[in-house]
Image (spheres, rainbow, N blue to C red):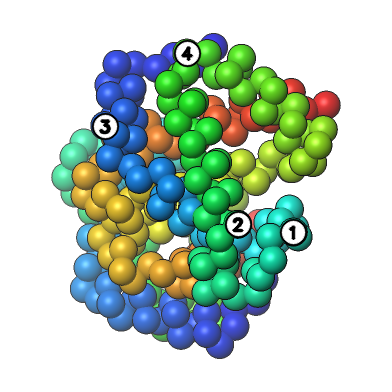
Amino acid sequence: MVHWSAEEKQLIASVWGKVNVEECGAEALARLLIVYPWTQRFFDNFGNLSSPTAIIGNPKVRAHGKKVLTSFGEAIKNLDNLKVTYSKLSELHCDKLHVDPENFRLLGDILVIVLASHFGRDFTPACQFAWQKLVGVVAHALARKYH
Amino acid sequence: MVLSASDKTNVKGVFSKIGSHAEEYGAETLERMFHAYPQTKTYFPHFDMGKGSAQIKGHGKKVAAALVEAANHIDDIAGALSKLSDLHAQKLRVDPVNFKLLGHCFLVVVASHNPAVLTPEVHASLDKFLCAVGTVLTAKYR
């Protein structure tokens, strides 16, 4: 069971409160597909992913990015109960989606970079620490039901 | 992983925009890395880890200089960093996983100071470049 200090929770909440989930989610997923092109393997039915411009403008990428980050929001609301919160999602990613958990780590790091670019100096080292912990814990919870 | 012509252009562009801030970015990269990944501090037991530490500033300057050197000799990173590669293999022996952590924190620093510079394409090129640097520095480990 992961322990969250009051400060960590506050740092996470204060950033999250200012995040535009749709924009941020779209940007994070687009960057994942651009920076680590092999991650496109999961999105054959997304249409045109042939260039960074195509990926950024792709409506399916935007929609899916929003979905993924919205789910992150659930994690933030349930920091003390992530295992249960993500149990079904973990099974889904293993049994139906067949996603290598390494991809969760890649997306988590991309999200941190996107947050840094949006919040600049406000995304302090302490903030980054809390968010690296969060993305790590989310990745772990998503991988937990793999078999 | 091969750096394309546009990767090289993108990387050189980043460092030219960063300019003289490189040293400051180097220090902040280390500060963030030590903070986000405390296990990385184990390589610096003799360091003052407090805010504004002269040792972190000094070491950040060295790290930045190496990255700038690699960018300036991007067609032959292995040649440019050969001595550093020997040093890491024979003396420092920093576990390879840590170069990824450092690279990631450098991207965070660039993103936080220059969001407009770090377009997705440039982000991809810079990430590849940082991987290449890490690979060179660990190439002689075994």
Residues at badges 2 and 1 in contact (C-beta under 8 Å)?
yes
Q: Quadrant of residue B60?
A: bottom left
Residue B109: x, y in percent?
32, 56
Label whose residue precedes the other's in the sequence (2 or 4): 2
Mark in front: 3 vs 1: 1
Q: Which quarter of the picture shows residue A77?
A: top left
On the image, numbered disc 4 is attached to which residue? A80
Give how far apart the Cα atoms at labels 2 and 4 are.
32 Å
- Are callouts 4 and 3 both on one chain? yes
Residue indicated by mark 2: A60
Q: Nearer the viewer, mark 2 or mark 3?
A: 2
Q: Name the amino acid, label 2.
A: Lys
Residue A45's disc number: 1
Q: Nearer the viewer, residue A36 or B87?
A: A36
Amino acid type of disc 4? Asp
Q: Check disc 2 and report its element: helix, strand or loop.
A: helix
